[in-house]
Image (spheres, rainbow, N blue to C red):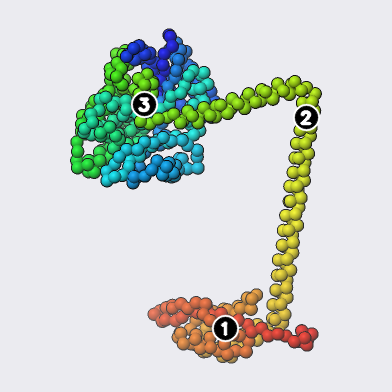
């Protein structure tokens, strides 16, 4: 078949395609179909082979390829913000996107469009796509060596496609129900008023292992949209909706149109292929499936020379810059190879010297690394030695003090003045010379008296509370206490040390 235009829609589980020609003011869509496909970003060449199989199966030779991406992992959201400059928006949007867990600490690209909102605010609709996913699709399609400069994130530009059918006044709805994701859009006066994305799609409502609609999934889907509708009507004084344009994969799911109209209470209309963008679209009767508008949309924009609201040109500018850089690198390598071949022995000698220098550098780096490691070990051993030395000196000082004052002396000094109403449950020395008393008493005054006597002792001073708790045994109140005191350290004379 002679060369025409090929439109592709890539979803998580399928590739849909439309193939058509331009004849005057007529877009003749002659082929449309769907193939099962699961995108695997690590499988290089897989997507290119899948598209090649479509070309071979349909025996078509496109002069240009157009791609529309419809995936659940593409983030499409709206933000209501105060009026701000484009520069301020460009600073805020990346931060908002990074707040989403699936986009945190990842490279991504995005597009956005501003619309006026109530009270002087601005409504921003944005779509973000993972950079790895975008680069993979572009490289795979470009590998087919067929002109490819048009990509679309579905369905952000669908409003522009249906613009001739949407009146300026009133509230109009576009509902796109795709395989694993759906979009609910409210348009008024040619601008988006609501753009809502939900994770329920036709694969949930019509599971493969069932012949009919899953009522539970359908009810959950309708309930989610009803909440969005109620929120919008509450904000806009219960304004009614004029019409809802429904786009879904119709064959085998014809009952979806009637069901969604009944559950949402909005009159449903299905867009056809007859008149779009000032062109008449001709298509076989059996291909009257609105879901193929998603794959045909970027192709129609190109043929009709229409400019969509969301321009994807910067996606290609970035991709083409990378391609030109790679081409320049390849050409440089070829040039270097030719020059090297021409220089002959000189080039070989240079290469050998380069290899030897590289080995020498690696050896020096290895020796430096070894010396750094050995230095680190020496510093560590030095620190360990200093720590042990300081510990031994501290212990020696403490032992020197303890050799002059025995524990029994301290305990004896305290016990002589111990109040009768105090029961001592613990007596403890610490390395720092701190003495700890713990016990029980019937009166707080008794404990205070003990602290005073500790301060008056010749061996202890600085008595103070560690804790004081009120307890009961058989309705009898008593107090548990903890007291800290410090051992009085006096300078020992030289004779005392000698006697010790």
Mark 1 or 2, which is nearer the eye? Answer: 2
| Camera-nearest residue between 302 and 488 | 302
Which of the 4 image quadrants contains residue 150? top left
Residue 259's spot in the image, x, y percent?
24, 29
Residue 53, placed above or below residue 409? above
Residue linked to disc 1: 462
Q: Is residue 469 left or right of residue 224?
A: right
Residue linked to disc 3: 307
Residue linked to disc 2: 350
First of labels 1, 2 by sequence position: 2
Would residue 224 be seen by someone viewing this image from the given angle?
no
Give the alpha-carbon distance from disc 1 to disc 2, as whole Å. Answer: 81 Å
Q: Tell me what residue is drawn at x 42 percent, y 29 percent.
A: 312
First of labels 3, 1 by sequence position: 3
SS under mark 2: helix
Residue 161's spot in the image, x, y percent?
32, 25
Pointer 1 local density, CA inside 10 Å: few below 14, some 14–19, many at least 20: some
Q: Tell me what residue is drawn at x 57 percent, y 83 percent.
A: 462
The C terminus lies in which quarter of the figure?
A: bottom right
Give the alpha-carbon distance from disc 3 to disc 1, as whole Å. Answer: 86 Å
| Camera-nearest residue between 295 and 498 | 295
SS under mark 3: loop
Mark 3 or 1, which is nearer the eye? Answer: 3
Q: Tell me what residue is drawn at x 41 percent, y 81 percent.
A: 476
Pointer 1 with pointer 2, Cβ within 8 A: no
Q: Tell me what residue is drawn at x 53 percent, y 29 percent.
A: 321
In the displayed image of the protein, which residue is found farthest to the top? 1
Which of the 4 image quadrants contains residue 257? top left
Residue 272, placed above or below residue 360? above
SS under mark 1: strand
């Amino acid at each position: 078949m002679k060369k025409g235009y090929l439109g592709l829609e890539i979803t998580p589980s399928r590739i849909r395609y439309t193939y058509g020609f331009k004849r005057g003011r007529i877009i003749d869509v002659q082929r449309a179909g769907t193939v099962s496909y699961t995108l695997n970003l690590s499988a290089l060449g897989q997507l290119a082979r899948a598209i090649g199989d479509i070309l071979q199966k349909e025996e078509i030779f496109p002069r240009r390829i157009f791609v529309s991406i419809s995936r659940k992992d593409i983030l499409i959201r709206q933000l209501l913000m105060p009026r701000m400059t484009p520069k301020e928006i460009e600073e805020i949007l990346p931060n908002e996107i990074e707040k989403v867990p699936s986009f945190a600490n990842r490279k991504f690209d995005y597009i956005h469009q501003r619309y006026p909102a109530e009270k002087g605010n601005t409504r921003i609709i944005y779509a973000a796509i993972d950079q790895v996913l975008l680069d993979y699709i572009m490289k795979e399609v470009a590998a087919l060596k067929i002109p490819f400069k048009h990509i679309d994130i579905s369905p952000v530009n669908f409003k522009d496609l249906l613009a001739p059918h949407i009146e300026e006044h009133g509230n109009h709805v576009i509902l796109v129900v795709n395989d694993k994701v759906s979009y609910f859009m409210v348009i008024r006066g040619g601008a988006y008023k609501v753009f809502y994305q939900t994770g329920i799609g036709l694969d949930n409502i019509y599971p493969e292992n069932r012949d009919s609609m899953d009522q539970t999934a359908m009810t959950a889907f309708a309930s989610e949209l009803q909440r969005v509708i109620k929120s919008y009507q509450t904000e806009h004084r219960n304004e009614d909706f004029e019409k809802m344009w429904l786009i879904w994969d119709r064959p085998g799911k014809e009952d979806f149109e009637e069901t969604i109209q009944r559950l949402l209470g909005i009159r449903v209309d299905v867009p056809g292929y007859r008149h779009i963008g000032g062109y008449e679209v001709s298509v076989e009767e059996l291909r009257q499936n609105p879901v193929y508008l998603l794959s045909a949309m970027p192709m129609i924009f190109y043929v009709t020379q229409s400019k969509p609201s969301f321009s994807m040109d910067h996606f290609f500018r970035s991709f083409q810059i990378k391609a030109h850089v790679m081409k320049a690198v390849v050409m440089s390598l070829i040039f270097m190879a030719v020059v090297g071949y021409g220089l002959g022995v000189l080039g070989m000698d240079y290469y050998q010297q380069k290899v030897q220098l590289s080995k020498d550098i690696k050896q020096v780096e290895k020796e430096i690394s070894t010396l750094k490691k050995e230095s680190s070990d020496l510093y560590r051993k030095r620190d360990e030695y200093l720590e042990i030395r300081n510990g031994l000196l501290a212990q020696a000082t403490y032992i020197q003090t303890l050799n002059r004052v025995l524990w029994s002396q301290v305990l004896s000094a305290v016990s002589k003045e111990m109040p009768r109403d105090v029961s001592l449950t613990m007596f403890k020395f610490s390395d720092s010379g701190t003495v700890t008393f713990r016990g029980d008493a019937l009166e707080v005054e008794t404990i205070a008296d003990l602290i005073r006597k500790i301060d008056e002792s010749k061996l202890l001073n600085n008595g103070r509370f560690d804790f004081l708790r009120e307890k009961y045994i058989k309705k009898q109140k008593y107090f548990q206490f903890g007291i800290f005191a410090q051992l009085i350290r006096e300078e020992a004379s030289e004779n005392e040390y000698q006697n010790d």
